[in-house]
Image (tube, rainbow, N blue to C red):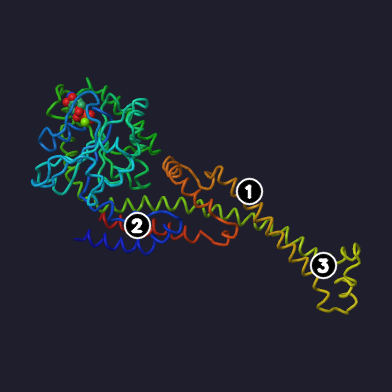
Amino acid sequence: MLETKLQTELQNKVNKKIAPLFSKYNMDFSSLESGMKWKPIVLIIGNYSSGKSTLINEILGTEIQRTGQAPTDDAFTVITSEGNDRPKEVPGSTLINDDRLPFVKFKKYGEKLTSHLCLKNVNSPTFQNMAIIDSPGMLDATTEKDRGYDYMEVLGEFAKMADLIVLMFDPHKAGTIKETYSAIRNTLPEKSGEDRIIFVLSRIDECDNISDLVRSYGTLCWNMSQMTGRKDIPHIYLTYSPDVANFRKVADLWPQERKELVEKIYAAPNLRLNHILEDIDRQVNELQIVCEAVTEFTQRGRKLFRKIGKITVGIGVGLFCFGDVLTNSLVSLPQQTLISVLRGGSFSFMNLILPLILLFTALASGWVVFNNFGFKRLLQKTLSDSSDLVSLENEYRRNLWKKMAGKTNEFLRKSKAKDIRQGHSGNLAKIRRFLEDDLKKYYDKLRS
Ligand SMILES: Nc1nc2c(ncn2[C@@H]2O[C@H](COP(=O)(O)OP(=O)(O)O)[C@@H](O)[C@H]2O)c(=O)[nH]1
Ligand SMILES: [Mg+2]
């Protein structure tokens, strides 16, 4: 109840304060309803044969997914309970054409993905209000090319929808976490994003001894700190499947973690509001970096304008005072210069005509120089490498920029010299206030 109230309140706030800014910067704000109209989703990802399908079978208590040591399954399988009257299995081609489901966005990845996507309808009360998605593990770079669609991008899209992401690794391939993690990192907001991911080192029963396990754990941690740039390591669940584990000496030291992991997965529906918050957070952060870049560009434009302006005004004033002296000495016109009439005391408006013409010509030329050369050059230079418009102090910012640089350039390319009149720092301040005050308040409310 409280959650619905918070959700509506938040939605109104976003529509009022932030949505107009998205259209201002030619960005789409994917409305909250569209992505999250379906059930809460748990996404299981990680290297192949890390035990993803085994975990899913364990949760459902049935052998719904095929398991095996090799990359046995190369499909994204959505498992949920849709009722007995619905088909047991729905192919990808149907899923991507059903507006009620959140899979329409996968249409653009083509037939190769569609044929590797399906929904399995199981008979389970718990799964009436949630879905779990099994995913193919990442292969090595060369094999990955044969897949026929951009696996990393698709994984990112699934991660965006998921309320909970379980990132699973086995001790043999703990080093491959980096690629998988970077595929989903952009789908999360900067600060709170980690809450939505659970890191799991699975199949720990296969470690011969503790030092073996510690080595794998260390590899995982090292790779994780490389990605997050953080020194603190989030909790890593050390688990094994009780059904298939054989050598239990090491595993028995962590008997409870599998249970905790499964409980977390069951509790995923509670994370929905958090997900909505994070989704807004992510999108507003994307908007923020574009706005930052545009603000910086405008400031550079203004600086250049001032520089050319100063010179122009200098020349203009010089021409205003002494221009007629020059024309007088060259073509004997005007007969009386401004200075001479001011000295002689016989000033009339006629004496101002030429100085004013010269002044305005100088100012107009200054504008032409700024408009046709200065600004154009600045724009070209900026477009050739716009990355210095924003500070890129960490991996998150670098990734975010990589994603948004195209959007920014697209916006800048359309800008005209006269647009520098328009300040963007006010918009930036609004965005910052929204992230730091409004959104934070909701995060706090949710946690309290
Ligand atoms: N010893 C052991 N084997 C496991 C464990 N979890 C999964 N396996 C086995 O590892 C292989 C790969 O598992 P699977 O669930 O298919 O991995 P997926 O590719 O990530 O879906 C299968 O042969 C499983 O029986 C575990 O905790 N311990
Ligand atoms: Mg599998």
Q: Badge 2 local density, few (<14 within 10 Å), some, or many (20+)?
A: some
141 lies left or right of 374: left
Question: Where does label 3 land, which residue?
Answer: 321
Q: Quick check: which quadrant has ligand 2?
A: top left
As drawn, the label of residue 377 is 1
- Give the SS element for disc 1: helix
360 lies left or right of 15: right
**Percent coordinates x, y for residue 442 in the rendering:** 30, 58
Q: Which residue sits at x=56%, y=52%?
A: 297
N-terminal of the two: label 1 or label 3? 3
Nearer to the camera, 253 or 52: 52
**Percent coordinates x, y for residue 54 in the rendering:** 17, 31
Label 1 to label 3: alpha-carbon separation:
32 Å
Q: Which residue sits at x=88%, y=75%?
A: 341
Nearer to the camera, 69 or 165: 69
Q: Amino acid at mark 2?
A: Leu
- Give the SS element for disc 3: helix
Q: Amino acid at mark 3?
A: Cys
Q: Amino acid at mark 1?
A: Arg
Can you tell which quarter of the image residue 381 is in?
Answer: top right
N-terminal of the two: label 2 or label 1? 1
- Give the SS element for disc 2: helix
334 lies left or right of 14: right
**Percent coordinates x, y for residue 208 in the rendering:** 22, 20
Can you tell which quarter of the image residue 66 is in?
Answer: top left
As drawn, the label of residue 439 is 2
Label 2 to label 1: alpha-carbon separation:
39 Å
